[in-house]
Amino acid sequence: MLKQVIVVRDDLKLPKGKMSAQVAHASVDAVLKSLTTKRGEELVKVWRESGMAKIVVKAKDEKELYKYLQIAKDAGVVNALITDAGRTAIAPGTVTCFALGPDKEEKIDSITGELSLV
């Protein structure tokens, strides 16, 4: 089974609409990055055919978010870090979230499995 996980900073206390937009940015960006490799193309194809599972979890702050981002990078999992443009609720350049995957569930869980759901 394949899935994608999006890790959101909990300390920002983003309004639901803002958080939803940031999560969507991360998800789409990670998928687009995946499509640049043959392996990624196949993962996205299988992921789409199986329902495009997405899980949103929280990191307590920016430092913790970067910790998990580095683990994802070290594991070779496609990822997409999102910084806000600052047009609404938060300052420009604020790191809000990142997506990892789609990839094998076991691989994703080994990185983010201990984080709590939003």
Image (cartoon, rainbow, N blue to C red):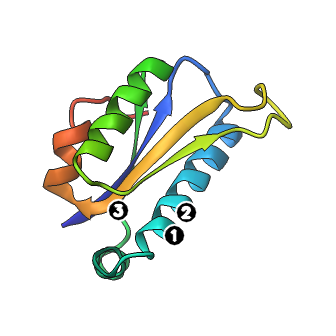
Q: Quadrant of residue 70?
A: top left
**Residue of label 1:** 32
Q: Secondary structure at mark 1?
A: helix
Q: Earlier in the sequence, mark 3 or mark 1?
A: 1
Sooner in the amino-acid sequence: mark 2 or mark 3: 2
Name the secondary structure under disc 3.
loop
Residue 16, position in %: x, y? 65, 36
Q: Could you give the CA–CA distance between mark 2 and mark 1, rounded to whole angstroms? A: 6 Å
Which amino acid type corresponds to the residue marked 3 in the rendered image?
Ala
Q: CA distance from mark 2 to mark 3?
A: 13 Å
Do the residues bearing badges 2 and 3 touch, measured as CB atoms within 8 Å? no
**Residue extending farthest right:** 87
Q: Residue at x 67, y 29 (%)?
A: 94
Label number found at residue 28? 2
Q: Amino acid at mark 1?
A: Leu
Query: Would residue 77 be found to the left or right of residue 34 on screen?
Result: left
Residue denoted by label 3: 53
Residue drawn at (32%, 29%) of the image: 116
Quadrant of the snapshot with the N terminus:
bottom left
